[in-house]
């Protein structure tokens, strides 16, 4: 019963390095999301996808890229890491079922850029 | 106007108190409504869905007022374990996309 799996759980990056945060879900959900959450703050939507091959920007997309080649996977790419990208990143998926839409979240990736 | 707005909080209440959170949403076409709970340094998890007729789950009661585009969550007999951030969530009008409020932090004190 995996749900949404994010890797890695923790990462320290140097300024200018790049990395990919992985997210996979096994519930066959169409919607997937990437959020960042800074300390003491709310969730900010980075990118989302309504299905394989379709992605769209959220409120804070700058400095990030995504792809959705399969229903299961929704990786988030940081090309040139900056200290401002130090945050906790959550991936989520959701699907309309029986008139209800519930989102399931991964456990988060804690990223520090130094 | 933001899509989903919540009480800014934080709320600090003693054990046993009743506390209410409010939330407004801007898109009248929104169809589904939820309250999520987020513990410190953890991922958000679904607390309860909100139905048009209102619904109750133990000490928690959720209400929806479509005319006023308003959602509420009432917690009775607060426990220390209720301390968390409560997120109001609605589906974007005309789609399944979920829109999260910024959350309201609750601390229940002994």
Image (cartoon, coloured by chain):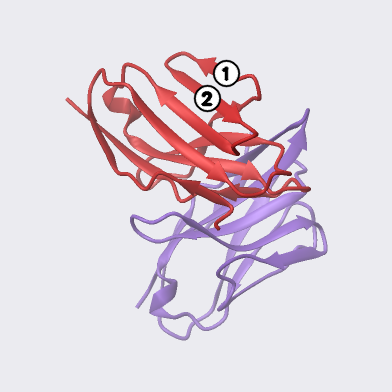
* Nearer the observer, B76 or A32: B76
Quarter of image, res A51: bottom right
* Nearer the observer, A29 or B87: B87
Say whether residue A104 is left or right of residue B30: left
Q: Quadrant of the N terminus of chain B?
A: bottom right
- In the displayed image of the protein, which residue is found farthest to the top? B58
Image location (x, y in percent) of residue A18: 53, 79
Q: Are marks 1 and 2 in contact (CB under 8 Å)?
A: yes
Image location (x, y in percent) of residue B56: 53, 16
- Residue B84 is marked as none
Tell me what residue is drawn at x 72 percent, y 68 percent. Answer: A67
Tell me what residue is drawn at x 46 percent, y 13 percent. Answer: B58
Image location (x, y in percent) of residue A105: 57, 45
Vertical side of A108 occupied by A99: above or below = above
Of mark 1 and mark 2, the one earlier in the sequence is: 1
Q: In the rendering, what colour is chain A?
A: purple
**Is residue B19 visible from the viewing direction of this image?**
yes
Vertical side of A79 occupied by B64: above or below = above
Say whether residue B76 is left or right of residue A85: left
**Secondary structure type for disc 2:** strand
Packing grade of label 2 (10 A; few <14, some 14-19, many >=20) is many
Which chain is mark 1 on?
A: B
Image location (x, y in percent) of residue A55: 75, 65
- Residue B55 is marked as 1
- In the displayed image of the protein, which residue is found farthest to the left? B110
Q: In the rendering, what colour is chain B?
A: red
Packing grade of label 1 (10 A; few <14, some 14-19, many >=20) is some
Vertical side of A32 occupied by B31: above or below = above
- Residue B62 is marked as 2
* Nearer the observer, A39 or A82: A39
**Is residue A111 visible from the viewing direction of this image?**
no
């Amino acid at each position: 019963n995996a749900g949404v799996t994010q890797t890695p759980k923790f990462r320290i990056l140097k300024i200018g390095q790049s990395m990919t945060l992985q997210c996979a879900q096994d519930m066959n959900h169409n919607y997937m999301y990437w959020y960042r959450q800074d300390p003491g703050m709310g969730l900010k939507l980075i990118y989302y996808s309504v299905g394989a091959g379709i992605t769209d920007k959220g409120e804070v997309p700058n400095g990030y890229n995504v792809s959705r080649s399969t229903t299961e996977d929704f990786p988030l790419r940081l090309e040139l890491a900056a200290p401002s990208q130090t945050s906790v990143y959550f991936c989520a998926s959701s699907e309309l079922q029986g008139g209800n839409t519930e989102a399931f979240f991964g456990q988060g990736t804690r990223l520090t850029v130094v | 106007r933001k899509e989903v707005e919540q009480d800014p909080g934080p709320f600090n209440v003693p054990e046993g108190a009743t506390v209410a959170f409010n939330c407004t949403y801007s898109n009248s076409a929104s169809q589904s409504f939820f309250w999520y709970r987020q513990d410190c340094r953890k991922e958000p998890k679904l607390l309860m869905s909100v139905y048009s007729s209102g619904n109750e789950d133990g000490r928690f009661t959720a209400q929806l007022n479509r005319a006023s585009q308003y959602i509420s969550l009432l917690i009775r007999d607060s426990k220390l374990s209720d301390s968390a951030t409560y997120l109001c969530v609605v589906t974007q009008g005309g789609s399944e996309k979920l829109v999260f409020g910024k959350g309201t932090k609750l601390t229940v004190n002994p």
